Image (tube, rainbow, N blue to C red):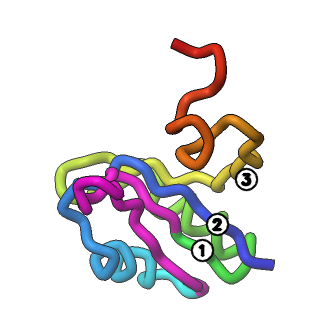
Amino acid sequence: MSQKLFIGGLPFSTSTEELSQLFNQLPGVESVAIAIDRDTGRSRGFGFVEMITSEAAADAVRTFNGTTLGGRTLTVEFAKPSAPRGKGEGFGNGGGYRAGRR
């Protein structure tokens, strides 16, 4: 079963290709993505790498967590499942604000 990794601390100039080259030093990379800000089109400084197996993911965490890329220290950890968004959250309902929040 595949395992997604969170990659934090990326230099904002890091491309998907650069991140892919880094992680492809190990076998088992399934996909690579960098989070992009919708408004600016620029990197948000983090991304995700999906590994084919949990063993490959654990090896990637051991290998790359704490290493530097472009002068920044990477945080590589198992991604946490995203929580389901309920009514009143997100941009489709109330402009991105929860009711009662100011």
* 77, 13: nearer the viewer: 13
Q: Secondary structure at mark 3?
A: loop
Q: Quadrant of residue 12?
A: bottom left
Mark 1 and mark 2: Cα distance apart in space:
4 Å
Mark 3 and mark 2: Cα distance apart in space:
9 Å
The residue at which mark 2 appears reads as: 4
Residue found 55% across the figure and 29% down from its top: 97
**Residue type, label 3:** Pro
* The label number, if any, that marks residue 50 in the structure image: 1
Q: Can residue 60 be found in the magenta stretch?
A: no
The residue at which mark 3 appears reads as: 81
Segment tinted magenta in the rendering: 28-48
Residue found 51% across the figure and 64% down from its top: 48
Chief SS of the magenta region: strand
Q: Is residue 94 left or right of residue 55?
A: left
In the rendered image, residue 36, in percent from the top left (x then y), is placed at 35, 61
**Residue type, label 2:** Lys
Q: Quadrant of the N terminus?
A: bottom right
In the rendered image, residue 19, in percent from the top left (x then y), is placed at 35, 73
* 3, 37: nearer the viewer: 37
Q: Quadrant of residue 58?
A: bottom right
Measured along the vertical axis of the image, is residue 87 above or below residue 35? above
Mark 3 and mark 1: Cα distance apart in space:
13 Å
**Residue type, label 1:** Glu
